[in-house]
Image: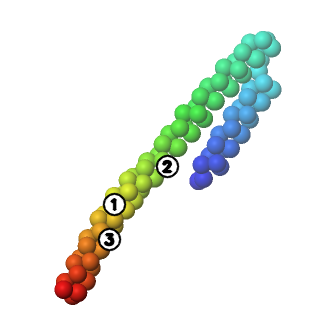
Amino acid sequence: MKISSLIITSIFAAATGVIAGTLFAPGKGSKTRNRIAKKGSEYKDYIIDNFNEIADSVSHPFENLEDQTIRLGEKAITKAKKIKADALEKVTNEIH
């Protein structure tokens, strides 16, 4: 499931729960509003926490990939310098 689908589904489920709670609430209006506000805050916190977890789990492989790319680039530069030095030495030896 895509991250955007998960987030949209979570928001939709939270909104549906709030609406259903409002329609079927047996208590006074002020108590119902307080409960809705509290639940809304809980859902918001839940979505933010899960979003951060998902974002972290997605970003870690890219951090590792970045490190590997840097190491590979450094290795390629070192190898290129060695090849250049070897070629320069061969050309110098053939001239003399």
**Disc 2 element:** helix
Give the percent coordinates (x, y) of residue 36: 72, 22
Label 2, residues with CA under 10 Å away: few <14, some 14-19, many ≥20: few
Q: Nearer the viewer, mark 2 or mark 3?
A: 3
Q: Which of marks 1 and 3 is in front?
A: 3
In the displayed structure, would residue 85 be above or below residue 23?
A: below
Q: Distance between the residues labelled 2 and 3?
A: 34 Å
Give the percent coordinates (x, y) of residue 94: 21, 88
Relative depth, front residue between 83 and 71:
83
In the displayed structure, would residue 56 be above or below residue 19?
A: below
Would you say the residues marked 2 and 3 are in contact, meaning their CB atoms lie under 8 Å apart? no
Residue at 71 percent of width and 32 percent of height:
17
Q: Residue beneath label 1, please?
A: 74
Quadrant of residue 93 within the rendered picture: bottom left
Q: Is residue 40 left or right of residue 72?
A: right
Work out whether residue 72 can be spotted: no
Q: Residue beneath label 3, please?
A: 80
Three-letter code, disc 2: Val
Quadrant of residue 29 within the rendered picture: top right
Quick one: quadrant of the C terminus? bottom left
Label whose residue precedes the other's in the sequence (2 or 1): 2
Give the percent coordinates (x, y) of residue 3: 60, 49
Residue at 25 percent of width and 83 percent of height:
91
**Disc 3 element:** helix
Relative depth, front residue between 48 and 32:
48
Q: How far apart are marks 2 and 1 (CA)?
A: 25 Å
Q: How far apart are marks 1 and 3 (CA)?
A: 10 Å
Three-letter code, disc 3: Ala
Q: Residue beneath label 2, please?
A: 58
Would you say the residues marked 1 and 3 are in contact, meaning their CB atoms lie under 8 Å apart? no
Work out whether residue 51 can be spotted: yes
